[in-house]
Image (spheres, rainbow, N blue to C red):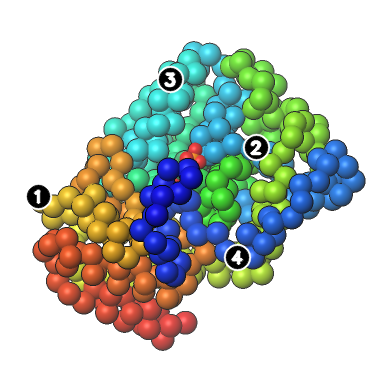
Amino acid sequence: MKLSNGLALNGHPAGRHFLQIPGPTNVPDRILRAMDYPTIDHRGPEFGRLGRAVLTGIREIFRTRSPVVIYPASGTGAWEAALVNTLSPGDSVLMCETGHFATLWKKMAERLGLVVEFVPGDWRHAVDPETVERILVEDVQRRLRAVCVVHNETATGVTSDVAAIRRAIDASKHPALLLVDTISSLGSIDYRHDEWGVDVTVAGSQKGLMLPPGLSFNAVSDKALAASKSAKLPRSYWDWHDQLASNERGYFPFTPATNLLYGLHEAIAMLLEEGLENVFARHRRHAAATRAAVQGWGLEILCADPQRYSAALTAVLMPAGHSADALRKVALERFNLSLGQGLSKVADKVFRIGHLGDFNDLTLMGTLSGIEMSLALAGVPHSRGGAQAAMQSLAAADAVR
Ligand SMILES: *Cc1c(COP(=O)(O)O)cnc(C)c1O
């Protein structure tokens, strides 16, 4: 069958597609229905109620009392907003090469005219707080204006310890701002904007928040807001001040993504109904079971530090000489299962299993069974029994609950 948009379909694929890439994630029916509603006047009274509800509610997810700015943009837009609102041309910033996303944020900073001190990394480890502290202590002239870190590096499945990075900055007595990308961790992995003294938290809609792509966020501390008063990088669309002025009454300075905001309202309600602590525990339990499966297959997890395993995704190294993309192709064609590809330096060498968002034990077992069957079909050397090991891990976690 050929669709009018040119897409070819070999008949209707029965059952649900398994979107197990680490974002976008599966959108729950409750959120889809919440968005299936007429678009309203974004300057009318009904919109004001919606705007106030989401602008207040989202603070609970960031665990902040500070304002959260919401953009109709992908996460990349919110990266740019964080930089252009707080920094000036020629400012130096400290970034750490945890993986592909940290590297992209660094390239953006350079394009914007910032000078980046980039701590090299092997794409298997988290940000090292001691290195951050040493660099800040050595920066006696206080050239560095910001430390920018990716909380959960989605390319590698490695989560950095933001609280420890905060302690490192405090220990160095350095005044740099702390900017954190939580695009693939917010709503999946414990995160505390206020308690951890983060100045700008960057997030997106399509990962832990279970929404379609199209919204992104900046949670803004008082210190970041003060920095924005003197920051000189050119900005217009991204300017926090226009946003904050309109947000006070629940409105936006330009047309917001109204239907995505209906979805956001529902997503916040769902996360709070489950309870954030329960959401995080659910993700940790599924991540542990996924790792049990990978170890059961005899394959290697990309993250080399068990303390820093991601609860949102697991990146798996292929045995030498075997293509991750060939395996992913089998999984998609035979089982309607999308797995994350290896990005840039690890292209075709790793595949990524997303276990975040709207996800339960059976979504996990469907995903892992699909991978195990695909490993066999693709002729990848492995041991059987990974999926079985994951079931044992789930049961063992329940026994201690
Ligand atoms: C997905 C992702 C991004 C990019 O977000 P877009 O919505 O694709 O612009 C940036 N950082 C991290 C950690 C991500 O997971």
SS category of the residue bearing label 4 = helix
Q: Quadrant of residue 30?
A: bottom right
Q: In this figure, what is the number of numbered marks?
A: 4
Q: Quadrant of residue 381?
A: bottom left
Q: Position of residue 126 (x, y in %)?
A: 35, 46
Q: CA distance from mark 3 to mark 2?
A: 22 Å
Nearer to the camera, 31 or 11: 11
Q: Horizontally, is 183 left or right of 292 in the view?
A: right
Q: CA distance from mark 2 to mark 4?
A: 24 Å
Q: Which residue is mark 1?
A: 321
Mark sitting on residue 71: 2
SS category of the residue bearing label 1 = loop
Q: Of circles 3 and 4, which is in front?
A: 4
Using a 10 Å C-alpha cutoff, classify the residue at mark 4 as few (fewer than 14 neighbours), some (14 to 19) or many (20 or more). few
- N-terminal of the two: label 1 or label 4? 4
Q: Which residue is mark 4?
A: 29
Using a 10 Å C-alpha cutoff, classify the residue at mark 1 as few (fewer than 14 neighbours), some (14 to 19) or many (20 or more). few
Q: Of circles 2 and 4, which is in front?
A: 4
